Amino acid sequence: MAIEKMALVNIIGRFEDLDETLIRCCDSGCFHIEPAFKNEANSTIKLLNEKNPFGVPLKEFASLATEMGIQLTETKGTRFKGWTAEQFNELSDNIDGEIEEKSKEKQRLAAEVSELEGAVLQVDHLRGMNSDFSKIFACKHTACRIGRMPADNLAKLQYYDQTFFFVPFETTRDFCWGMYFCAEGDKELVDSIFRSMFFERIRLPEYVTGNTDEALKKLDGQITEKKAQIEVLDKEISQLAEKHDQTVLEAYTALKKRYDIFELRRKVGAVKEKFYIKGFVPKKQADKFTEGFKDMDEVEVVLLPADADANITPPTVLKNGWFTRPFGMLVEMYGLPKYNGFNPTAFVAITYTLLFGIMFGDLGQGFLLFLGGLLVGKKLSKQAGGIVTRCGLSSMVFGTLYGSVFGFEELLDPVYESLGIDFLPLKIFHSTSFILLSAVAIGITLIVVAMLMNIFIGFKEKNYEKAVFGANGIAGLVFYGSLVTLIVCKYIIKVELASGAVFALLIAIPALCIFCRVPFSIALKYKKWRLSEEEEDMTIGGFIVENFFEMFEFVLSYVSNTMSFLRVGGFVLSHAGMMLVVMTLLDMSATGVKPVTLIIGNLFVMAMEGMIVAIQIIRLEFYEMFSRFYESDGKAFEPVNVSFDSDINI
Amino acid sequence: MMDNFSSNATTAKIRAKYAQLFTEEDYREMAALRTVSEAAEFIARSARFREAFTEVDPNTIHRGYLEELLYRENFETYIRLCKFQGLDKEPFFGFLIRRSEIECILSIINRINSSLDRTYLSDLPGYLIKYLSIPVMELSNSQTYDELVAGLKGTRYGKVLKKIPVREDGNADYTECELRLRTDYYEELLEQADKEFTGGVSDELKTMILREIDCRNIINAYRMKAYFGYAPEEIKRRSLKFYGIGKTNMERLYEAADAETMMDMVNHTIYGKNSPDTDNIEVEINSVKIRRLRHYLTGSTHAPVALYAFIQLCDIDVSNLVHIIEGIRYGVEAAAIEAQLITL
């Protein structure tokens, strides 16, 4: 239940081995890459930021597949191993050559359709014009331009004294479509004026004739005709595609891998003709990883301790046993611990399972949860399934203690009677106070355990403020423990343990330590007397005010965190209460409907109560316990890999 | 107090918009692009500019129009934020319009001085026309400085420019015009911040404005020292007479023996702390500025403060984008482009 030890890996080699090195890093499945250097403009050592040569052939093959109607799927094969971008280009050209004629014809037709559709769009914007286009363009002494310009610039037109006029046809939010006329002799000057106002000229095709309506009708007819021709060509191309689909798929898969690997170069450093890769591997896999490069003479793999480079933080991998592993998901949800930090998964696994069982105790429902967990683990998520399975088992155990099976509270009574156990099953509505007090007791125990863990972590990190003087350190533990003992002895057990003065001392001294935790820890660490670590000039007044409010917050958090565990007891009662409602409904139902009422009632309680309990325990874990000892400032371990994807986003 | 609460929605909106500004990672990704079209497409895909680029084809867009669209989006974001809860009724919130007016007037003066006849009309950003209070298009046709001043008669700018002596060639000194117009602008802005708001809002606004002026003064002083070799007295004369770090401190910077000494001294002021390792004064000073603006934007609950800080951050964001576009256009290496960007 710790954190996986890492090794810092430096890989140095010659550029000709770079691709193979990166491929092997990916294939190892355990290499987490880090940028080799910080990219700075004037530095002689730079990260590689070259253009990916595999981008072009990858796009080519993707378009080839689209052209031939081939669905891109991952296809394994070795015939393209070691191919260069040029070889891939050549292959795509060869395949393309075979379908070129038909494809070109199709493209030509598609381009024509697109042009015609473009023309329709443009002509559509000119609906205000009823004259024949060809007549306008045939004018000898007048130049005319059709296009669009930013609508914002329209207002400027009247301030030019050159002889031109602009006829607007349609104005959208950003652009105004229209045409301008000017004398043939002023054409260049007027063109430059319009260009400066970002006028985008549209060249209408020669085939657009007649007025707007006539032109649109003609264009629509032409589009329909050309689309029919494209359909015929598509059929012919798909016949050719069947011949080449395997090659295209294999080449695309290989190319995608090469492309992704080349992309990793952005994190590779270049020093003269050598490359430099930096990253991490789990220590237990380090030798196997190094082994993978043994046959590459020019590539040197150097293993260093994980903390050898102060500029990069090692990533964190939680090391968990079979029981605790699924709960790693909850820890990751909160945030990973830093490398060398404390892995709280075991703590979460135990407390989560226990609390769930207590709050959702039912033998029958627990069994269903267990089965559901197995199903979820197989079909959906292994981790979520694992958590549900364990919670189900815990629910069964506590359900047996409560004597509850699908809401039937008396079903197990004969079993206990035959065994001669008279204090079980625990009748929930007969032991309300016991349940609530037990819930608070569980809370106190968990808070104390959280504090003990904090003390352990504090000493491990040599952080005395955290371990000794903090609100969750030894001082906090003594303060909280004394307070709890005093209250329990005085009001619950009604026993006088010691004099009030002793307790006052046990509370006052730790309180003083917490109040002065910063100066005390500085004194212990640096043998100096300072009120604050960061700001040397903190005044005594400022120190008192700041720490007074912090003390207030600490004491409040002890009380609120402890009381927060009342919800554990609350949910025990709520679960039993909800099942009582189901049982009442069952009694009221007709005999034939009873099984349906029982099933729906149980499923409803399981779904609703189950989810609420799961969420409430997460809340208890994160707020009441994690906040006392856990710091989540770790970085996830992300091994480099290549993944197949049919969508190219280059 | 009620005013403060009533503009909370604007503050929340500004913070949401702030999240749409480009990040360092976005800049890095954009700087690695090869063509202006790719850059345009990258910008068009962003949440901040998606709406502004709906009718634009990134493949054919003119670079000039691309840049104008970026500036337009900044301006329109400002207009939308002001109108959202009717903030534009307060004169203070006209600050960006007044600043734009000054930019236009200065551009016209520059054109007149360089005898570039009428060209400003083409360069005048079209989106500004309907918001400006001065007849900017008529003014664009001014052939002489006197004509310009006559066109501005009755406006605040007219009064300021009238006092500037005209040289023998009929033109006025551009630097003098700029200094006086900006002095008048900041004077009015500080007065409005003082009168229209109370307590913390007023204080925060004034501090922010004074720091903006300080940054401008330091950058200008450095340039005057490093590139033109101006004497301290001349620098003092050409600088704005408002001080965030105090007159004495600022004048001490002006009096530094050379540009390098001045930068060393700047590094011991609030404008030098934690600045990135760069030899570009603008990057250095503005990086510190960004940190402070972000602090105001995320920390203040007052809409005027958040808006003023946000607009400046938007300006820096767009200037970075324009810088990248220009870098891509001239084939500058990605790392070199990144080094010139103003980031934290």
Image: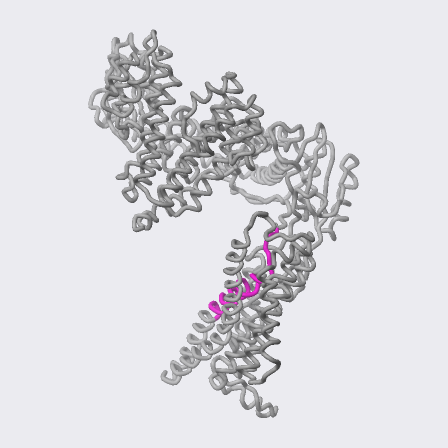
**Front-most of residues B61 and A207:** B61
Q: Quadrant of residue A259?
A: top right
Q: Quadrant of residue A248?
A: top right
Name the residue rendered at 54%, 83% in the picture: A492
**Front-most of residues A356 and A180:** A356
Residue B212, position in %: x, y?
43, 33
Residue B134, position in %: x, y?
26, 25
Is residue B271 rendered magenta in the image? Answer: no
Residue B74, position in %: x, y?
38, 34
Residue B225, position in %: x, y?
52, 20
Q: Is residue A140 above or below residue A533?
A: above
**B3 left or right of A312?**
left
Q: Which residues are magenta?
A: A610-634
**Front-most of residues A615 and A394:** A615
Q: Residue furthest left?
A: A130
* Residue A102 visible somewhere in the drawing: no
Name the residue rendered at 33%, 48% in the picture: B4
